[in-house]
Image (spheres, helix red, strand yellow):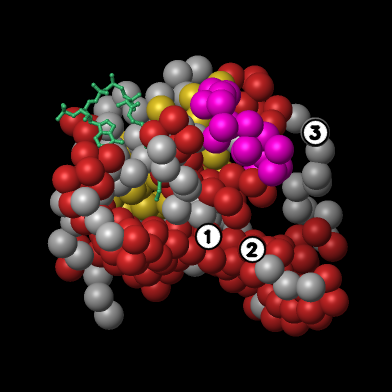
Amino acid sequence: MQAIDDLDLKNLRVTVDDAGIATVSLNRPAKRNALDAATVEEMVALFGLLPRTGVRAVVLRAEGPHFCAGLDLVEHHREDRTPAEFMHICLRWHEAFNKMEYGGIPIIAALKGAVVGGGLELASAAHVRVADASTYFALPEGQRGLFTGGGATIRVADLVGKARMIDMMLTGRVYKGDEAVAVGLCQYLVEDSEAKALDLARAAAENPPLSNFAICSAISHMQNMSALDAAYAEAVVAGIVNTQPASRGRLEAFANKTAARVRPE
Ligand code: 1HE
């Protein structure tokens, strides 16, 4: 099978620790990690491969003070793309981000600085978002004379609702801090987003991989279904996951009263 080391990555950097936690770094800090076509191709390759490598969870982070400045506007300007060419660029963004959302491996985004435009589309394809005090979210597409093309109409609208997304795009509204948590752009606001993301990845990696696979793919698939079909699919997935050998010991520990109870901190 292909290995992560076989991938020719230049704008992404990947390390995997002994616990199977992969740290994926956006590595174009001089360009504020703007997403050019080459970076998106690296994401398609990497996130297509990761679910088959035994990696148990991913921390998605960035070099430099900003998480991601979105579409590489300079490349887009220079290339002077036709409508069909840019449609195909967007389809590659969807390919990459769908591989993240539906891949079955928990992806925890450690955010900082600008998470804007396509950078927010990228962050919203992760399963958990952790922000720090420097993090801010915006969709400046309207001001740039553009429109979202990397899934924001689906994922950002899902996080914050249609009305807030439209406001962000029309007016350039920026969210940060507690307000960003309150509207659903991120789930955690902490001093050190990378340390927290790693803690969360480690916690998720303790779950059986089949449970995580269901959590990090089935829920998204079921949202695309009618309620009737989703209920059916949920029953089928639960049939497989809830009878897996990996959960037997955990259930036995609960029955024996040796397993941890669910308590507030
Ligand atoms: C870039 C990009 C970029 C920086 N494409 N090169 N996204 C935006 O509208 C956000 C555009 N970027 C910014 O507003 C600012 O750069 C930041 C707030 C993110 C950072 O500010 P700052 O002062 O730290 O950096 P800077 O001086 O603006 O930029 C530093 C370098 O990064 C500079 O390159 P240099 O070669 O002149 O040094 C910038 O050109 C470069 N850079 N951002 C290309 N985005 C699928 S559709 C998605 C549609 C969208 O994503 S629209 C939103 C686009």
Q: Is residue 224 visible?
A: yes
Residue drawn at (45%, 19%) of the image? 134
Mark 2, Cα crowd under 10 Å, few <14 / some 14-19 / many 20+, is some
The image quarter containing residue 26 is: top left
Mark 3, Cα crowd under 10 Å, few <14 / some 14-19 / many 20+, is few
Which residue type does callout 3 highlight? Pro
Which residue type does callout 1 highlight? Glu
Q: Quadrant of the C terminus?
A: top right
Q: Which mark is residue 247?
A: none
* Residue tagged 1: 101
Please give the range of residues in magenta: 159-175
- Secondary structure beneath label 2: helix
Q: Position of residue 210 (x, y in %)?
A: 59, 71
Q: Residue 199 versus residue 219: which sits nearer the camera? A: 219
Which residue type does callout 2 highlight? Ser
Quadrant hosting ligand 1: top left
* Residue tagged 3: 264
* Mark 1 residue's CB less than 8 Å from ligand 1: no
Labelled pair 1, 2 in contact (Cβ < 8 Å)? yes
Q: Earlier in the sequence, mark 3 or mark 2?
A: 2
Marks 3 and 2 sit apart, C-alpha to C-alpha, by 28 Å
Residue drawn at (63%, 31%) of the image? 167
- Secondary structure beneath label 3: loop
* 21 is higher (above) or lower (below) than 4: above
Q: Can residue 12 be seen in this view?
A: no
* Residue tagged 2: 220
